[in-house]
Image: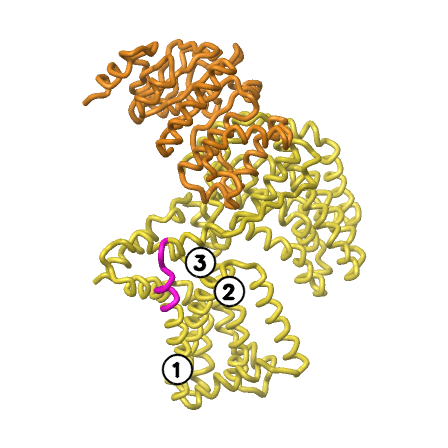
Amino acid sequence: MITVNNLTKKYSSSTVLNLDNLIINKGESFGLVGNNGAGKTTFFRLILDLIKASSGNVTSKNINVAGNEDWKHYTGSYLDEAFLIEFLTAEEYFDFIGKLHNMSKGDIAEFLNLYADFFNEEILGQKKYIRDFSKGNQKKIGIVAAMMGNPEIIILDEPFTNLDPSSQIRLKRILKELKAKYDLTLLISSHDLNHVTEVCERIVVLEKGLVVHDLQTNENTLKLLENYFAV
Amino acid sequence: MIYKLLFQNKWKESLRSSIWQKSIALNIILGILMLYFLVNFLLLGLFSDKIIMEIFPDENPVIKFNGLLFYFMCIDLLIRFLGQTVPTLSIQPYLHLPVKRSSLMHYLLGRSVVNPVNYFYFVIFIPFAINAVSSIYSAEIAFLWLFILLLVIFFDNYLITYVKRQMGNKPIIVLGLGLLIVALIVLDTYKIFSLQKISEDFFTSILLQPILIIIPIIALICIYYINFSFLRKNAYLENISKNNSRKSVSTVGVSFFNRFGVIGELMNLEVKLMLRNKRPKSIIYMTPLFLLYGFFFYPQEIYMNMSAMLIFVGVFISGGFMMTYGNYLISWESSYFDALLTKSFNFQKYFQAKYTLLASVTVISFLITIPYLFFDIKLLYINLACFLFNLGFNLYIVLYFAMNNKKYLDLSKSATFNYQGVGVSNFIVVLPMLLLPILIYIPFAFMNMPTIGLIVIGCIGLIGIVLYKPIQNIIIKRFYQKKYEIAEGFRQH
């Protein structure tokens, strides 16, 4: 699904990301862990063609993402607040994104209905702009919007941060269900080792822009990761 | 002690504010602009007594000047309403610290004493006090006069702080105040009710009987105290943050656009952007002024004979919005630019939406200003040529150069005197748009063929309109080359 070929990203002289070859298969749930500055967000931004690679490329369905926009139709993403339009209400934002995916009003309502539990009655019908929501609720809006339009790939940067415990559990359930149902390719990064090992089948550990571990998740993975990050 | 610390922090805040983190060139341009206004005001101050004596040769210029002071107060209130900010938020970091609440409020109010803006008018007042007041009355009276004006200015300052805290930024207040001033001027000219007379009597009697100075002093103390007690009661976090979040939210979109698919959605989004954020909104409020720009020039014989000047005005009337708003066309969306880049639509449509929006405003502006032809029919031809030029040339310039802005734009701050996210290119790009049509016109005017000159300007516009597709492709191609750079810039804030 996604192939990385000798991808590097340099800022002036320092290399922030350097990946040789990495293949993410269709239907895989791919977890990215690493301390701050490891290059997680940079990697996601490169996959989304938000920054220009210094060398190498990322292909999605065998087409280079740079200079092509086909991937946008089947890739849902939420990295940070820059993905939200702060002066819209939550409904208007979903409406906007939905329309871009050619969803009708009915489709959108039906879609949002699926996430009623996750929203916990705090998102819809609030009569306030997105900028006035709490960080956690902003994140919920962004994550759900990323799932609009039946994407085949979903990319989320630290989706569990700022969510309350119940919402974290609900989100894990949602991600697993989506994956089982639609054979979704899932890319998430997280600082929470518990969550990421629970959701992802494959975990890649980045350190200073390099892959230091590439693991298939099993019962020992969490222990291994905890040892790796122990100081 | 505590005040000293607070003011120190304020001083650091000002020094480290993003205002200074502009390029040197921009600071120089702004500096020159400031200097220009300062010199203008200074000249006005130096010559105001002579100007008054010229108009009213037999009257006391000081009394005449006093007659204008209440009007000055009203206009100052209007300007302050538009420009003055009420930064309650700045005390938020101190509220939980062991500082007395009342000290914080006094600090918040006292800050305006050190705000240089409040002393700006004295560039006019001091020369007048020296030239006129001290020579007609005495040096002591001149000091007294300046002191009264100081009281007046701070009265205005605290009055507007209170009004703004109470009512927020409602445009209806500006409109009301504007209409009130116009009404007072009308009543004055027809001698029905003379604010001028009241103003003359009020200020002159203080000069004659200095003890009356107690009246403005008491007024100032009262308004300060009203502010203070209101603040002390209301400075809690929930009230402070209420400033940013409006209670009820208008969710009315412009359903008219919905018919146009993705382009319509993008235009709808842009309209919401304009209406719901302070900074673009202040540009919207200014747009009617662009339309009225003609009234400054057309009634005057000198300008009516200067066709080059009229072209300048013509470009500005239908293109003013396009130039001011369009300058930041992409930067307006800097806070969610990453979202746009990853969502499933084509950037062809993105630019088409922008083009349609700016073009619509330009067309509407032109149509509204057609009645200027009642001044002179030639204005219609000039404005038509300029309108075509705007649509077929300037609009592309705007779209093309909007990509040069790579700075994050904070939408929540008002636009008056706000240079956050502004670069030198924003000033430079306006120049060819205003000057080029004049440069094209001048040679024809010299050859005594002004009509041909206008036709050429209009034709350039028409050709541009016809070549819409290829020009748009050039713009989009450039966008794809620059998008990483732009997105990178927007992320840095």
Chain rendered yellow: B
Kindly state the secondary structure of the residue where label 2 is placed.
Answer: helix
Q: Nearer the viewer, mark 1 or mark 3?
A: 3
User: Badge 1: few (under 14), some or many (20 or more) residues near its Cα, within 10 Å?
Assistant: some
Quote the CA–CA distance across marks 1 and 3: 30 Å
Chain letter tied to orange: A
Query: In the rendered structure, are the residues bearing label 1 and label 3 in contact, judged by CB atoms less than 8 Å apart?
Result: no
Horizontal and vertical percent for residue B384?
A: 76, 48
Q: Image point 51% across, 81% down: which residue?
A: B66
Decide: few, some or many residues near mark 3? Use Cα within 10 Å; few <14, some 14-19, many ≥20: some
- Chain that bears disc 1: B
Q: Position of residue A84 (x, y in %)?
A: 49, 35
Would residue B75 be found to the left or right of residue A230 on screen?
Answer: right
Question: In the image, is B244 to the left or to the right of B291?
Answer: left
Which residue lies at the image location 63% right of the left edge and 71% below the top edge? B182
> Disc 3 designates what residue?
B85
Give the numbered dot on residue B144: 1
In the image, is residue A58 above or below residue A107?
above
In percent of width and height, residue A20 lies at 37, 10
**The residue stretch that appears in magenta:** B229-237
Query: Which is nearer the eye, B107 or B291?
Result: B107
Residue B40 badge? 2
- Name which residue type carries label 2: Asn
Q: Chain of mark 2?
A: B
Residue at the extreme left: A231
Question: A203 or B76: nearer the eye?
Answer: A203
- The residue lying toward the viewer, choosing from B486 and B353, is B353
